[in-house]
Image: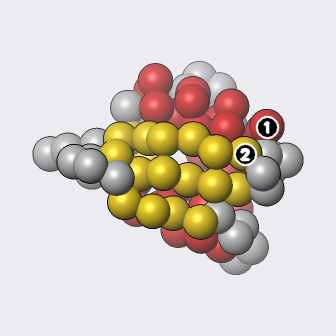
Amino acid sequence: MGPKHLQTLQAIFADPVRSNIAWRDIEALLAANGAQITEGAGSRVRIALNGMRAVFHRPHPQKETAEGAVKSMRRFLAEAGVKP
């Protein structure tokens, strides 16, 4: 995992929860950790990582991920064994 991915991971796990993390940075972090990312209907994105599966919605029209989605991503990454 490169320094940019580590920075994104730390931002996801930061307290208080941030709402200014770009979704493309989160997707890049997931891909760097070997996640399988597939497109769903509309803005849905299916993610499989280390035996865990989840469905997220890409934010639109903004590029930043909302607090609730960051909390869900934090939980997903922790369950998949990816922590800072």
Distance CA(mark 2)–CA(mark 1): 7 Å
The residue carrying mark 1 is: 79
Residue 52 shows which numbered tag? 2
Q: Amino acid at mark 1?
A: Glu
Q: Position of residue 7 (x, y in %)?
A: 64, 59
**Residue 20 visible from this viewpoint:** no
Residue situated in front as seen by the camera: 58 or 8: 58
Q: Extreme left residue here?
A: 61
Apparent side of residue 67 relative to residue 30 in the rendered image (left or right): left
Question: What residue do we see at 74% from left, 73% from top?
Answer: 1
Question: What residue do we see at 70% from left, 62% from top?
Answer: 6
Residue situated in front as seen by the camera: 79 or 22: 79
Local crowd at mark 2 within 10 Å, few (<14), some, or many (≥20)? few
> Disc 2 or disc 1, which is closer to the eye?
2
Question: What residue do we see at 79% from left, 37% from top?
Answer: 79
Q: Position of residue 60 (x, y in %)?
A: 20, 44
